[in-house]
Amino acid sequence: MPNARAASAADLASLLALFEIADVSRHAEPEERAERIWSQCLARDGLTIFVSDADMRIVSTCMLVIFPNLLRGGRQHGIIENVVTHPDHQGCGHGRAVIGAVLAEARKQDCHHVLLQSGRADPRVHRFYEKCGFRSGLRTAYAAHRPAGLD
């Protein structure tokens, strides 16, 4: 089974290459902006990006954001974002490795729960998350997008 690790400063180019081929969302450009955002991510308390490597490059990633909470007995909340696995490496355990690392870190950080949203219509994506231990239908998600014209 593949392993996951916390991303490091040297991983930006490999992550951007993964995002370039992924059917998720466009990545930050120009390069200077991406470098600035990457530095902010690595420096921010409560934010960890996990990656899994194969063939000398990153083939899977996801981000865990943990924040404090006065409710739930003071136990923290975790949110997963930016789950991406290279199409050539899907079904090989890399996605499960990064999700497993996120869940282990969330337990270690005393999270009440870890939330994940998916806008993907592909039922395979939802089956994957269910196999990783997530249950749908427990909450309703809402999203407010940035108004048009502010991009």
Image (cartoon, rainbow, N blue to C red):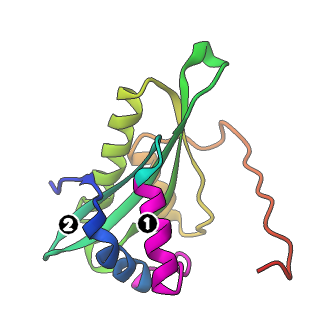
Q: Nearer the viewer, residue 27 or 22?
A: 27
**Could you tell me how many numbered marks the image carries?**
2
Q: Secondary structure at mark 2?
A: strand
Residue at the limit of the structure toward the top, as seen here: 73
How far apart marks 2 and 1 lie (CA) works out to 18 Å
Q: Which quarter of the figure has residue 18?
A: bottom left
Residue 38: mark in rendering: 1
Position in image of residue 117 (x %, y %): 60, 53
Of the residues under marks 2 and 1, which one precedes in the sequence?
A: 1
The 10 Å Cα crowd at callout 1, few under 14, some 14 to 19, many 20 or more, is: some
Decide whether residue 97 is among the magenta residues: no
Q: Which residue is mark 2?
A: 53
Q: Which quarter of the figure has residue 73?
A: top right
Position in image of residue 102 (x %, y %): 37, 44
**Looking at the image, which residue is at 54% across and 20% down?**
75
Position in image of residue 11 (x %, y %): 28, 69
Q: Amino acid at mark 1?
A: Trp
Q: Amino acid at mark 2?
A: Asp
Q: Which residues are magenta?
A: 21-42
What quarter of the picture does the N terminus occupy?
bottom left
**Looking at the image, which residue is at 58% across and 29% down?**
68
**Looking at the image, which residue is at 82% across and 78% down?**
150
Q: Secondary structure at mark 1?
A: helix
Residue 87: mark in rendering: none
Instruction: Classify residue 1 as left or right of residue 143.
Output: left
Q: Nearer the viewer, residue 46 or 91?
A: 46
What quarter of the picture does the C terminus occupy?
bottom right
**Looking at the image, which residue is at 62% across and 25% down?**
69
Say whether residue 23 is visible: no
The 10 Å Cα crowd at callout 2, few under 14, some 14 to 19, many 20 or more, is: some
